Amino acid sequence: MNPIGVFGGTFDPIHYGHLRSAHELLYALKLAEVRFLPCGLPPHREPAIASGEQRLAMVRAATAGEHRFVVDDRELRRDGPSYSVDTLLALRAEFPARSLCLMVGMDAFLGLPKWYQWRQLLQLAHLIVAHRPGWVAPDTGPLGELLRDRVTENTDDLHESRAGRIFVHAVTQLEISSSAIRKMTLAGQDPRYLMPDAVREVIMKSGCYSAGLEVSA
């Protein structure tokens, strides 16, 4: 069976940048599905502004039109920080024979050594790095060593083993950020066309980024 893509994030809110990257990786890597996992308590950044329930509603609204986009709320249901290694351990127990592909941006990859039990990640999944212009993969230090040992340019490697490889893939650059959307909404501007209309509707009806809420950068 084809690999499962694992796409975590605060999704505060989810927007077309997230969706386009997931769409391109779904087809480029011939994934069976991309599993969206809204983060409960992010360990490497400030807590989300919208509640877990609101962000889950936004992700469900955004992905409703693609049957291979699956929404997984396990990180919202789990107490404590949402460590990726814990999520992958749970998914590995659920799918012991399947290839898992953890999808991260290049910026997240560059910060990988700060992640909790980061070296265990490749024992549980492949690492898919969504590359954007302006980022340069390291060739020294622990990440440079990791790339030399684990990188592949062959998607078949992701299908033939359950975990352990790094695949770097360029995705379309869309200059959209969740923080900019939050600031725009707080300022009374309409975020239309930066996300699916169904996500915009959740934002407008819930007032999750309205005046009175602090908007983090």
Image (cartoon, helix red, strand yellow):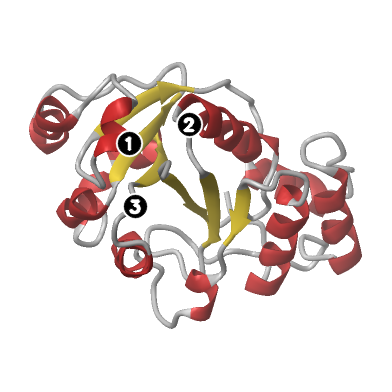
Is 39 left or right of 70, judged from the image as shown?
A: left
**Is there CB contact under 8 Å for labels 1 and 3?**
no
Picture coordinates of residue 91, whole percent (x, y): 37, 64
Quadrant assignment, res 165: top left
Q: Earlier in the sequence, mark 1 or mark 2?
A: 2
Q: Secondary structure at mark 1?
A: helix
The one of 95 and 204 positioned closer to us in this rendering: 95
Q: Residue at x 63, y 34 (%)?
A: 17
Above or below: residue 48 compared with residue 33: below
Q: Secondary structure at mark 3?
A: loop
Residue holding disc 3:
98
Marks 2 and 3, Cα distance to the nearest angstrom?
A: 14 Å
Amino acid type, residue under disc 2 in the picture: Lys
Picture coordinates of residue 122, whole percent (x, y): 21, 48
The one of 151 and 98 positioned closer to us in this rendering: 98
Picture coordinates of residue 69, whole percent (x, y): 62, 48
Which class describes the residues within 10 Å of circle 2: few (<14), some (14-19), or many (20+)? some
Q: Earlier in the sequence, mark 2 or mark 3?
A: 2
Amino acid type, residue under disc 1 in the picture: His
Is 172 left or right of 189, judged from the image as shown?
A: left
Q: Residue at x 31, y 35 (%)?
A: 158
**Is there CB contact under 8 Å for labels 1 and 2?**
yes
Above or below: residue 12 compared with residue 162: below
Marks 1 and 2, Cα distance to the nearest angstrom?
A: 9 Å
Q: Earlier in the sequence, mark 1 or mark 3?
A: 3
Residue holding disc 2:
30
Quadrant occupied by the N terminus: top left
Residue 159's disc is 1
Amino acid type, residue under disc 3 in the picture: Arg
